[in-house]
Image (spheres, helix red, strand yellow):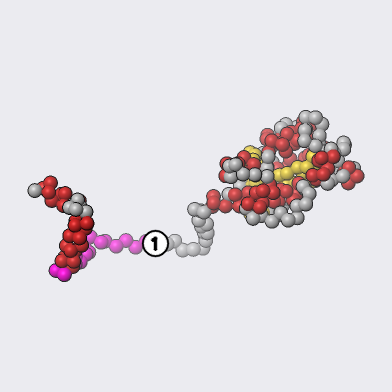
Amino acid sequence: MRQIFLDTETTGLSAENGDRIIEIGCVELLHRKLTGNNLHFYLNPERDSHEDALRVHGITNEFLKDKPKFAEVVDQFLEYIAGAEIIIHNAPFDVSFLNKELALQGRPTFTSFVDGITDTLVMAKEMFPGKRNSLDSLCDRLEVDNSGRTLHGALLDAELLADVYINMTRGQDALLMEVESNSDEQTRTTEYVDLSSFQLPVTSASEQEIAQHADVLAQLDKSSAGNTVWRKLENSVA
């Protein structure tokens, strides 16, 4: 299964009010192993970031002014994510911005290009009800090193999310076994043995063992004031 961990940074909180994507970070996981085949863009949003957003990601307008616009990278981006399961923390936020950017290019919605979307925030709330489930909180809880995260960054956050997700879902593989096949290995045969002629030896208890057993039963019967199961059965038969 091909999974892509995706994160974005934006100029603000509302795609519908004109905010735009300024950074996209994608990390690929194939068969639960990081491949290194990641994708990362800084984008010129053609507008300024809100002050609050700038304090979160620290990506200045000056830095972004010579970066490509979304229209210039959209084909590369869609080719990369095509057919994959996309994993996002608080997916509705990022997907709303991606849908807006795609709509501006006359493209279908984001979900039409991918196999599905998994929201790790929803997963975390189910696993850790009543607790804080921000990405930083999950890193602390699952012992994922986020010491390098002084500011939000799309690629760094996608990498951290991949580590968090692997830890959150580690139990999925607990009962799985890896089977390696060798085409050169000779076909194995099983030898069947007829056990019908075998007679198992029967060892009877000695007189001493019988006496010791009877003594234990008598002590149990005495402790229960005659309410042991065998005593009740004897009385019912009598």
Seen from the viewer's position, the closer of residues 18 and 238 is 238
**What residue is at 88 percent from the left and 46 percent from the top?**
63
Residue 137: horizontal and vertical position, in percent? 67, 48
Describe the element under mark 1 as helix, strand or loop.
loop
Residue 34: horizontal and vertical position, in percent? 66, 54
Is any atom of residue 78 visible in this view?
Answer: yes
Residue highlighted by disc 1: 189
Residue 167: horizontal and vertical position, in percent? 61, 52
Magenta span: predominant SS is loop
Seen from the viewer's position, the closer of residues 39 and 174 is 174
What span is in magenta?
190-208
Which amino acid is tagged 1?
A: Thr
Q: Residues within 10 Å of mark 1 (few under 14, many from 20)?
A: few
Residue 61: horizontal and vertical position, in percent? 88, 42
Total numbered labels: 1
Quadrant for residue 71, please give it. top right
